[in-house]
Image (cartoon, coloured by chain):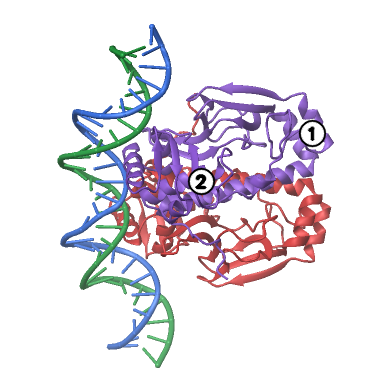
Chain colours: A red, B purple, C blue, D green
Amino acid sequence: MYQSPMKSELVDCGDCPIRHKAVCSRCGPPELAILENMKSYKTYEAGQTIVWAGDQTQFVGSVVTGVAALTQTMEDGRRQMVGLLLPSDFVGRPGRELAPFDVVAATEVTLCRFRKAPFEKLLAETPSVASRLLEMTLDELDAAREWMLLLGRKTAREKIASLLAIIAGRDSSLRLASASGRVQFELPLSREAMADYLGLTLETVSRQVSALKRENIIELQGKRRITIPDFAVLMNETGDDTDGGMLT
Amino acid sequence: MYQSPMKSELVDCGDCPIRHKAVCSRCGPPELAILENMKSYKTYEAGQTIVWAGDQTQFVGSVVTGVAALTQTMEDGRRQMVGLLLPSDFVGRPGRELAPFDVVAATEVTLCRFRKAPFEKLLAETPSVASRLLEMTLDELDAAREWMLLLGRKTAREKIASLLAIIAGRDSSLRLASASGRVQFELPLSREAMADYLGLTLETVSRQVSALKRENIIELQGKRRITIPDFAVLMNETGDDTDGGMLT
DNA sequence: TGGTCACCTTGATCGAGATCAAATTTGGAC
DNA sequence: GTCCAAATTTGATCTCGATCAAGGTGACCA
């Protein structure tokens, strides 16, 4: 499963709570100081829609805390999550008039926001910001394409294992025993949200989670807290290459 | 289904056969003239792998003629196409060491290529190129996310109809009766390639194509030449919003 | 301390698409 | 033309995940 190489490059901005990958006005080049004045924080409650697909885009920004989801819905109600936004992920579309997808808060979410127009001006004038944002977008594209393999070709069990492996790998609260060994984390998604992400029904998600539990590949404390006794064993269930991908 | 807004912005470069969206050295800003010296064309035959996943990336470039596919393969042979590259599409990853996916020629393909290092240098120094490439990448990302909805939630029939609608819409040979009315084009993909793109088996693809033919939604001349008597009727089968997406 | 509501689990059955197995078509090669 | 291998179509059957339908669980509150 795809692991963003960006993760190790995150910069903590001290009293700026957000670790912007591209737009931090404290740790970036001096041009970015102008962003400091137009920065604003906003918190959304779980379940709230932050942006509606088709809306005029008002702002760009980053997730500070919480988890948000990019989703699409068909007229008859079928829904597909097309992206998961974790802290430090970028939200918005410089250069686009209309938002292409819904952005929904999966948990309580705090965003650090910038008005779009001045941000775009900065982008046009500052190559370092543009190339940083390009790099981030390429990462997102790679992640989306990994997800296409999951949606198109993996079994329900492989989908669940892959999702758990990704969340475990990205959750900042554990950064410890990452490669293998015992890992514990809080699921930020309901069974229904997991189903929407994986292209399954919530019943199938529940059944497969139960099956992994029964086989001691995962342990549950309550519904949402998950312990993985051996990360390598979980990885075996994802269908992904277990080696680094290089066939030497 | 997602329609790239770039299409209308394509620039024809006269005796330069490629309509680079971002990197044309004839129609771009003067800095790009340096690219002219390192441009090289190469043709690949149908079925040939242009880039192997995991390879060192040697070049970036654009598709001049033909159709190429980005694909991923699991150890047990399950395959998923994650992108379709048509003429004028960009190939490669500035800023990446290793190619993330295989690039395979679906038909005979001609690429216009640039060595990666000088291209990256140009990218860092030329904001207009970086922002153009960012815009293109955002389009690809939107297209990938549309495709995630297709893979996760659409029926086999909707998948086939969507693919035909996209190819019809992107194929440069028809740019005529686009919105509705009669449309005709050559399928650049085998049934197996279609299956790999749609997350289906080739038998299911064949059956659904036959069904659409039986219901006079499409007509076949041979296996690959397709006529759509009424594009709007085909769109009805895709599951997508038939209106422009704006609910006024 | 019991009620309620949202979320989750489990069971029974169904069906779309996969799989296995032949035909049939076709586009070249000669 | 005629032959052949590859691509495609079609048929029969099976299976995984969807669907329909109850129950269980726990957090919150009166």
Q: Mark on residue B179?
A: none
| Disc 1 target residue | B32
* Residue displayed at 30% across by 57% down: A210
SS for dot 2: helix
Q: Nearer the viewer, residue B215 or A138?
A: B215
Q: Residue A207: name its quadrant.
A: bottom left
* Residue displayed at 59% across by 39% down: B172
Q: Is residue A23 left or right of residue B1?
A: right
Q: Nearer the viewer, mark 1 or mark 2?
A: 2
| Disc 2 target residue | B166
- The amino acid type found where label 2 is placed reads Ile
Q: Residue B37: name its quadrant.
A: top right
Q: Is residue A133 visible?
A: yes
- The amino acid type found where label 1 is placed reads Leu
Q: Is residue A153 left or right of residue B63?
A: left
Q: Is residue B45 shown above or below B132?
A: above
Chain containing mark 2: B
Q: Going from the N terminus, do you reach mark 1 or mark 2 first?
A: 1
Q: Residue A193: name its quadrant.
A: bottom left
Q: Is residue B211 left or right of residue B82?
A: left
